[in-house]
Image (cartoon, rainbow, N blue to C red):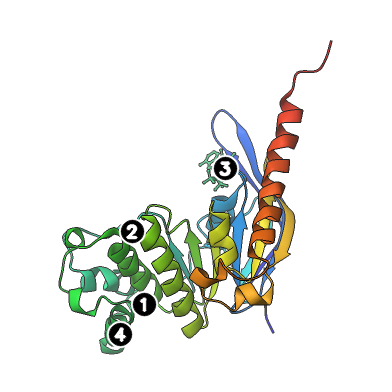
Amino acid sequence: MEDAVRMQGVTYVYVTDREATLAVENIDLSVRPGEFVSLVGPSGCGKTTLLSLIAGLMRPTRGEVQVGGKTITDPSPRVGYMLQQDYLFPWKTILDNALTGLRLMGRLNPETRQYTKHLLHEMGLGHSEDWYPQQLSGGMRQRAALVRTLAAKPELLLLDEPFSALDYQTKLQLEDLVSETLKTHCKTAILVTHDISEAIAMSDRIIVLDRNPGRIRKEIAVPDPIRQAIPFQAREAPGFHELFNQIWNELLEISGEEAQHEQPAET
Ligand SMILES: Nc1ncnc2c1ncn2[C@@H]1O[C@H](COP(=O)(O)OP(=O)(O)OP(=O)(O)O)[C@@H](O)[C@H]1O
């Protein structure tokens, strides 16, 4: 079967008037259809850069990014992108907000409208489709943003810290909801998060990235007992704490190695 995402030898350099920053270097990454992969690593290791490359918002300096076997050179409706901020328009109702992407793509018709309403219902927002964003809680707003993203039926969902601005209880509830929704709709997803527990609870596989430049340091398959549980219960599954410690130690090692490099040479 075709990979849902395939990155081969991907390097990206940000170039400004004053400097060039090598953000990620020589990334080889394949994601299978239906797989949920998380990217973790220290701040600045290139997680968002990788998502932007997969979303086609930027083109690699070297290498190639494919989604569903096709090279990505521009943003594509096949890829949905969900961010920490919901970017809902305050003057539009929740239903209108959820239809925004479809309208922009010229794909709004009775069938896609019905599907969007179905998604709102599935996300527990059926009764609030005529409300305005300011009448909604943070968790409800994020659910509306998720509906907007899913309404276009993307093959792939990119999630850039979508739960990090929410309170803890809402975050846990949304993790379960998103996980269940993605499974129901058989979506492939890539999540960027600083929360190790969240990465383990939601993923099939975790990629730990090094910094300066961003490179893949380790790929960890999440064991079945954790994968098969819903995210909330996964935290109690056998092996969860060992995996947490393994990733935590990996991140500590990265900071330790960086500190060593930064130490002044002895005279
Ligand atoms: N627009 C830009 N111009 C120049 N350099 C950039 C730009 N965006 C990111 N960078 C640099 O590229 C590197 C990777 O940044 P990126 O935002 O992808 O990391 P990240 O892992 O997502 O960070 P964080 O966890 O803090 O969100 C960093 O060194 C950053 O300073």
On residue 43, which mark appears?
3
Counting from the top left corner in percent of width and height, residue 264 is at 75, 18
Q: Secondary structure at mark 4?
A: helix
* In this rendering, position of residue 162 left or right of residue 241: left
Quadrant into which the N terminus falls: bottom right
Mark 3 or mark 4, earlier in chain: 3
Which dot marks residue 86? 2
Q: Between residue 130 and residue 108, name the one nearer to us.
A: 130
Label 4: few (<14), some or many (≥20) within 10 Å?
some
Earlier residue among tags 1 and 2: 2
The spot of residue 218 in percent (x, y) is 74, 56
Between the C-alphas of marks 3 and 4, the distance is 37 Å
Residues at badges 3 and 4 in contact (C-beta under 8 Å)? no
Q: Amino acid at mark 4?
A: His
**Is there a contact, CB below 8 Å, between mark 3 and mark 1?**
no
261 shown above or below 129: above
Cβ of mark 3 under 8 Å from ligand 1: the answer is: yes
Q: Earlier in the sequence, mark 3 or mark 2?
A: 3
